[in-house]
Image (cartoon, grey):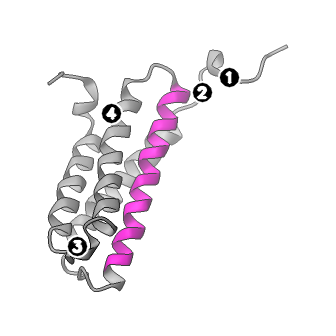
Amino acid sequence: MLNLSHKKLEVYKISFLLMREIYNLTNFFPNDERYGLVSQLRRAAISVCCNIAEGAARLSSKEKKRFYEIARASVVEIDTQIEIALQLNYLSAQEIMDFEKNEESAFRMLSKMIANLTPERNDSDSSTI
């Protein structure tokens, strides 16, 4: 594996914790959710990790921000799907206590990273006069 800088980011490490937690939590969902909610949750969890990595590899602030926004949107998607799983009694509030802390941390860190990125002058879509 490549030894790239994104692997040192705390948000990347937390995203991997989230991904593992999602896989562990969904192991106990009903079989009929295998291609529904289980698949959706797992894809969204993988999306967070991958978009953080891809964003970190981009050179322009504009592109980095775009991928971090996608990662953050995937965290929100996971949050909604976990809420659905709770409503369907696939999970209990007790089961997701640690998960919620990591989810909140990932969302907060990504939000801060996005806020700190401003488009570079040469990345602007509009021309200057």
Label 4, label 1: how far apart the Cα atoms are = 23 Å
Q: Give how far across and how far down residue 100 sits, in percent.
A: 29, 67
Q: Is residue 79 magenta?
A: yes
The residue nearer to you, when weighing 43 against 21, is 43
Crowding around mark 1 (Cα neighbors within 10 Å: few <14, some 14 to 19, many 20+) is: few
Going from N to C along the chain, the mark reached first, 4 or 1, is: 4
Report the Cα–Cα distance between label 1 and label 2: 7 Å
- Badge 2 marks a residue whose secondary structure is loop
Quadrant of the drawing holding the C terminus: top right
Secondary structure under tag 3 reads: helix
Residue wearing tag 3 = 97
Q: Amino acid at mark 2?
A: Pro
Tag 2 near tag 4, CB within 8 Å: no
The quadrant in which residue 59 appears is top left
Extreme residue in the right direction: 129
- Residue 124 marker: 1
Cβ–Cβ under 8 Å for marks 1 and 2:
yes
The kind of secondary structure element at disc 4 is: helix
Q: Quadrant of the N terminus?
A: top left
The part of the image, by quadrant, that contains residue 128 is top right
Residue located beneath label 2 in the image: 119
Q: Which residues are magenta?
A: 61-85
Q: Nearer the viewer, mark 2 or mark 4?
A: 4
The vertical placement of 58 against 67, above or below, is: above
